[in-house]
Structures are given as C-alpha cells and as structure tokens.
Image: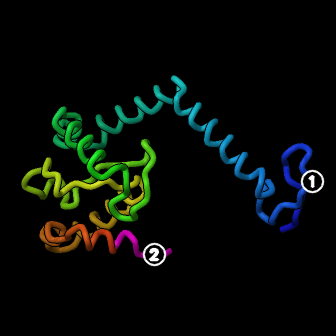
Amino acid sequence: MRTHECWKRGCHVLCRPGHDYCPKHEAEHQQERLAALKRFKQSKAYQQYNKNRYRKYNAEQRDPEANVFYQSNRWAKTRDFIKIRDMMIDGATGRVLADHDYIVDHIVPRRLCKDPFDPNNLWLLSRKEHYRKTQIEERIASQSHGDIKLRHIDKKIWIKWLNEKQKN
C-alpha cells in the first residue's frame, strides 16, 4: 500500500497505509460518520424499516410462546431492571454497552429454566456476544443430552468461553 496525503481539505500530512486521514483528522471523520449514522437511525424511513423487519421476524421465525413472553409487560420491567442493575456493562467482557447494543440474556436458556424472570439467571450481553453464545448453545443442544448440559453451564463458564479467541 502506498502513502498519500490526508483527505481533509488543506491538510498535507502523509497518512499511514490503509488510512484515509491523518491521525488528527481520522478522529474527526469518525465522529462525523457516527453522527450521520445516528441521524439515519433516527429517520422515519429507518424506523419504519426496522419495525417491519421485527414484525416479520416475530410473525414468521420466532416461536409463538417466545413471542408472547418477550412482548409481555413483566418481561419489559424485568429487562429494564437488569439493564439498571448491570449498569449497561457487558456481563462477559466488562465493556460499557451503547443503548442500542445490548440484549438481556438468560444464562440457562428460557425454555430450560424454572423461572424465566429470575434476575439471577439474567445478564446483559452485547449483540455480538449474544450471537456467539446462541451459536454455542445451539451446538450443545444438538449433542446427546444437550439440554441437560445447558442447564448446568453457569455464568463463570460462559464468561470463559465468550472471552476465548474465536478460531477462524
């Protein structure tokens, strides 16, 4: 890769290979991109798209029992309690989560636990960590006696597994 001048008008500093802006202007550009993304996500078109996408998912993919559960007032109150209790910190990595980047997750899957509203069985995860945890759960569930194994995996084990480097 070749070096080139910063893309900021009037700046003639050479950029590192693979970067479009010098370190000074890269931070500014990142802030501008985040602001544009925020404006886009607040637009009516995006909100309508997202609403339709979730409506379609709830109608076609999510099982009806889960749909009723996750739409209930009791779940909304429990979810908000966990969000406040965990102070928007990812339970697996300890990172602070953005308001759009969290999922309240059941440590023992909802279909296997006795009380799905038990706060001791709930924690905050980032969407990325939740996706990884779900993939691992699905692999374990497909094994013989998978449900029994899933009932006995505690929070410490999940933290260890989710913090291990992914094998590509």
Tag 2's secondary structure? loop
| Image spot of residue 110 (x, y percent) | 17, 53
Residue 99 relative to residue 24: left or right: left
Question: Image height check: is 160 above or below 130?
Answer: below
Image quarter in which the N terminus is found: bottom right
Q: Which residues are magenta?
A: 161-168
* Label 1–label 2 contact, CB within 8 A: no
Residue located 89% across and 49% down the image? 11
Gap in angstroms between the C-alphas marked 1 and 2: 39 Å
The quadrant holding residue 77 is top left
Question: Image height check: is 94 above or below 101?
Answer: below
Q: Callout 2: few (<14), some (14-19), or many (20+) C-alpha neighbours within 10 Å?
A: few
Q: Which mark is residue 12?
A: 1
- Residue 66, visible in the rendered structure: yes
Residue located 23% across and 39% down the image? 70
The quadrant holding residue 18 is bottom right
Frontmost of labels 1 and 2 is 1
- Can you identify the residue that label 2 sits on? 165
State the residue in front, 83 or 113.
83
Amino acid type of disc 2?
Lys
- Please tell me which of labels 1 and 2 falls first in the chain: 1
Q: Residue furthest top?
A: 44
Residue located 72% across and 46% down the image? 28
Residue 42 relative to residue 69: left or right: right
Amino acid type of disc 1?
His
